[in-house]
Structures are given as C-alpha cells and as structure tokens.
Image (tube, rainbow, N blue to C red):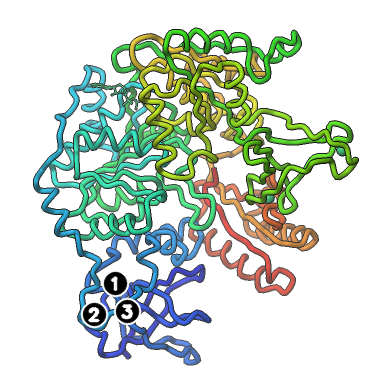
Amino acid sequence: MNLADVLLPVPLPGLFTYAVPSAWDAAAQAGRRVIVPFGTKKSTTGIIVRRHNTPPSDPKVVVKNLIEVIDDETVVLPQQLALWQWISEYYLCSIGEVFKAALPGKLKKIPTSSRKKGEASGLFEGIAQSRTTLTAGNEGESLPSLSPAQSTALSSIHDQWQQHPVCLLHGVTSSGKTEIYIHLIAEAIARGEQVLYLLPEIVLTSQLTDRLRAVFGERLGVYHSKFSDKERADVWMRQLSDAPYDIIVGVRSSIFLPFQHLGLVIVDEEHEVNFKQQEPAPRYNARNVAILMAARAGARTLLGTATPSFESYYNARMGKYGLVQLTERYGQVQLPDVEVIDVKELRRKRLMQGPFSPQLLEGMRAALDAGEQVILFQNRRGFAPQVHCHVCGWVPRCPHCDVPLTLHKRSGMLTCHYCGFTTPIPEQCPACETADLRGCGFGTERIEEELGRLFPQARVARMDLDTTHTRTAYEQILDDFAHARTDILVGTQMVTKGLDFERVSIVGILSAETMLNQPDFRAYERAFQMMAQVAGRAGRRQQRGRVLLQTMSADLALIRQLVTNDYEQLYQEQMLERREFSYPPFTRFVMVYMKHRSADIIDALARDTSHRLRTVFGSRVLGPDEPPVSRISGLFIRRVIIKMEPALSFSQARQFLLQTRADLLAEHLYASAHIYFDVDPL
Ligand code: ADP
Ligand code: ZN
Ligand code: ZN
C-alpha cells in the first residue's frame, strides 16, 4: 500500500495515515501540505511527515485516500517536525496542538482555488523579487563603537561560548546590551548564519526594529501576532526560500519559524514570564525551547537581562551556562536613586492625594517644569479594580468567573478581566436599590483621569491592554512619548519592559503591594524584576534619574534590596528558601489542571486525580487545591502539583501522567472534564 503519515492540527495524539492515490505519488513528499478527509468536517489541511508501505496493524481501521497535495515545495523542514515532536513530549500535549500553534493561519486554510495537479502553488511568488531589493546590500549605519566595558563583555561572551553553548549576559539597565547584540548579529551574518532575536512583548518590537533596521536594513524580518495572517505566512515562506531573512525579530511564536542555518539565538529580557504560553496548549516556554533549538542547530544562545530569572542565574552559577556581567551604564550614567515612600505613614497623617504621595507629586511637578518626562507604573488596568455599594456593601461579580468586575469608566462598563464578560454599570444597587455604587482602588484609567485634574497642562498617555489593541495604537503611544509629544506615560507592566527613552527623569511606582502580595513562591523574584526594570527606565542619558517607590511595606528586606539594587542578596535568600521547600530550580514542577462545569464533580475529580497520582509519585504530590481564581468562564478549576526531583525519570513520569488522564477521562462521571498539564509553570 502506498501510504503517508500526516500531521493534523487537532488535539489528538499521534499522526494519521492516508493512502496516496497514484496521481499524487510524486508530489506527496514529507514537509508538504495536503488536504485530507477528516472527522465530521469534510476536509482539513495537514503536513506529510513520512511515506511508507506498512498498513495499520488494526484491520478495522479504514485508510482513506488523501484528497490533494497542495505544495510543490517543502513548507515544514524536518528539523521543525523534530522540534515540534520534542515540544509535545516535554510539555505533555499532542503534536497536533503544536502544529496548530506553529503554522500561520493562512497556511492552515484550504486554498480557495484548489489547483490542478502540476500547477505552482504560488507560495513563493514575490520572494524572488524581494531578493533583488536585498542584494542591492542597502543597510545603512555602521556598527556602533563599543565602550571599553562593552568590548570586554563582548569578548567574554566569546570566551564563555568556547565552553558553554548558552551564555547569560547580566548587565544593568542601560548598560547597552542591545549594542552588544548588534555586534554579535553582525558577526553571525558575516559567517553566513541566521539569527533569531526573541523579545517577550510585542510592544518592544517597534523600538528595537528601528535600531536594528538602521544597521541591518532589509536583512531583518519581524514576526508577531499583530501582523496580518498574510504577512506572517510571507515571512514563513521567505524563510524557506533561497533568500531568507538573516535576522528574525519576534515574540515567542517565532521559535516555530523555519531556519535553514541558524547560528545565533538572542533571548532579550530572558526573565520575562511572557515567554511562557499559558493558554492554549502547547504551554511552552519559548526561551527554553529556543535554547534547545539552538543546541540542535549547533548555534549559540545569549540570554540577556538586567534581572536574570533565578533559574537562569542558578544555571550560570552552577556552570551550566556561561556568565558575563556588565555593571556600569553606558556613558557612566549612575543607576537611578530609589526613594522609598511609606504610604502607611502618609495615610495615617491623611497626606495622600488619592494614589499620589506629596513626594511623588512634587517630583513630578519639578520634572515637568524642567521639560522632562515621567513614567508611572500601576499594575492594574481599568478605572477601579472593584465596585461596591456604599450602603449595603454589594459587589458586582462576574457570573462566569470567581472574580469581581472591573469598572471601565470611559466605556461605562463593568468588565471581567478573565473571560471578557461586559455589562453596563447598574444605575442602582440590585441588593438595596440605592444609587450609591462606588469604585474602589485605582486602575490606570483612573490614574490618567486624576493626572488630568492635578496637571492640567501636562499631556498624558496611557499604555495598557485597553489602549494597545492594534499595532498602530501602541506604536503611536511610544512614538509620541519618544518625541516628547507627551509628558507623562502611565501604564501597567507594559511600561516596565526594556524601553529606551532619553528624557525620563522620574519613575513613579504607585503601589508595590499588588506585586508583593501574590500567593506564589516567585512573588519576590517577580516584584524585584518588575520594579528594578521600571526603575531602569529613569535617567538613561545625562543626569541621574529618580525613582519614587510607594509602598505599605517599607520595612521589607526586598524594598531595601531594590534601593541598593542588590539582586545577589535577594537571590541568595530566596535560594535558601527554595532549597528547603524543594521548589524550582531544585525540582521540576508539573501542574495538573482539572476543569468541570459541576462543583460536585470537580471535587470528586480532584480527589480521584491526586489519589491516583499519589500511588506512584507519593509525597511528591501536593494538593488538590483551588487556584486564586477558582472558576473561569463557567468552569470550576482545581489543580495538583507534582514536584519532580532531577533524578526522577521524566519519560516514565510522562507515560504515567498521560495514562492516568486517559483512565480518568474514560470514566463516565468525568467524561466532560478537561484535564491538562502545565510543565514548568510560571
Ligand atoms: P540596555 O538594553 O542594556 O538597557 P541599551 O542597549 O538600550 O541598554 O542602551 C542604552 C542607551 O545607550 C541606548 O540609547 C543606546 O543607544 C545607548 N548606547 C549604548 N551603547 C552605546 C554605544 N556603544 N554607542 C552609542 N550609544 C550607545
Ligand atoms: Zn446596596
Ligand atoms: Zn468572567
């Protein structure tokens, strides 16, 4: 029999076998797309993984014919298929789910005019043309000359790479890590290698691409989800052509792109949790997958950050990664001066003006008078995180999730930040019928409104999820701020990332509490990273910047460590704790999530799951427990954590986990439950 094993974008394990009609025999090669009949839908697209002649062992299986081969060329390279297989095994999901996440939508759709055999598929059209623009070799500026400290760091990175394929560059904010990356990129492309430059956040791509374009011109391709489907498919196909981009800058999904001769991977802001995909599967960490991908291609990896993740720093300290440290800012500008403002004390004395301390207001006023700019960081979007009735205390909550609704004043709506449920603000309290509903707490929208009142002359911009729906929207916000068309930028964690502005002299952290009070063993690590990063946006050129940090926990050691920028001390402290409690990096966590519509069934399922897992994993199993938000979109959620020590065989553990899930879902009671795994959760 003439057969092909085909990968389909479905959450079922394994590949699907189809018969190859003789008319398609020559065309049906591994790595090309095919249209096949599947399930209740008439047909779907897939990728041929291999050809063979072995009929399925189960004689009841009816092998259907594939309908059509779409491509004349390879669309997925063998190394991509191998990587996707690895991802599905490590992250405990199906390879179909990886394929679904990997391929741009356009390449998964059945082409509208299904072609006749022998006609070109047209995917490579336009690419030959772009090659001519490319070879017109039009990159502009020469490489920046490095400071002595940067040059030393650059040569140390090369030294470290002699022994370690992965090197961590721990360089303070504004030390000029990007300039070092630019040198490494230039060296790699001079050797004829390709470069993948990973960023954690779409918002960062425009500033960075401007800087890289100035040097590398059209050799640079950009890849992220705010690009249209067509643009993404074009980048994909171009990477398969004989004129691929030398450099790809992108967010986590760029690890799925085809690379023909990858030589260097840069993971910028490697500590960022955004590298981990939460929902849906594959729940992969793009930093970790990129390291693996580079190793397989024989490429080098550079992880760069001012605040390394404790996992990476641990790997560097243990000698698994190389380590290079850069302790001075470019131009020898001093690191910002961090002043702690005790909000508890000010509240007692009734000196706070809404979310602002007198010190912060004064600092802002002075900066604005001097024509300088201000960044304010508040980790809550919307107007007020919660609304309540002033008479009876009623709080509107999401009907589908276990959370209060957030007030968005401009739209006049209450919104659930978990499922998107939106409803108009009620005119009166449904419980006591008075008309006295009030918002409590401060979200970014409310801060923006307060600023309008306190600084009527200042031009204020807000950057959060609500204002950055489109690519043009966030590019506009950043561009306006960079060109001093706005004075104050207020935003959520988006403003803490690696942005580079020259006129920011004051950074205000409005409340450290939302970061400190997370029920998570990484809370302090995260809080330090976020606050040190946003602090690093201040005073990046001539004069030293100021950071005004408002907190209710002024006595906390962590706050002192922020003031002295003592990453090392926090790391040592936290490592003692993690070792004692067997937390990562000393163990690997696998989180088992269970979801169900029924409150009764979810508890039975959670008990049953943890019981079964304990028969093999014993005391490594923690829980079941409820996550902080225990119901989302109508589904109750429970979870169990398994702590796996390094000596434990992960492949055996994996087999058992998958078997346990299959057994549970086969039970009548749990038939409609969802059970999934999150490996190395963040
Ligand atoms: P980091 O990524 O370490 O926070 P950046 O790479 O953004 O720092 O550098 C901070 C600022 O200093 C940038 O505006 C950058 O252009 C400038 N800079 C850094 N190194 C150099 C250099 N060698 N020559 C000229 N400007 C530099
Ligand atoms: Zn009421
Ligand atoms: Zn909801």
Element assignment for label 1: loop
Q: Which residue is mark 1?
A: 32
Q: Position of residue 308 (x, y in %)?
A: 43, 31
Front of the two marks 1 and 3: 3
The answer to whether the residue bearing label 1 lies less than 8 angstroms from the nearest atom of ligand 1 is: no
Number of the label disc, if any, that sits on residue 27? 2
Q: Earlier in the sequence, mark 2 or mark 1?
A: 2
**For residue 122, what is the image quadrant?**
bottom left
Q: Say whether residue 93 is visible.
A: yes
**For residue 396, what is the image quadrant?**
top right
Q: Which residue is mark 3?
A: 114
- Give 634 or 114, whichever is nearer the viewer: 114
Q: For mark 2, does the 10 Å Cα neighbourhood hold few (<14), some (14 to 19), or many (20 or more) residues?
A: some
For the C terminus, which image quadrant? Answer: top right
Q: Position of residue 363 (x, y in %)?
A: 53, 9
Marks 2 and 1, Cα distance to the nearest angstrom? 8 Å
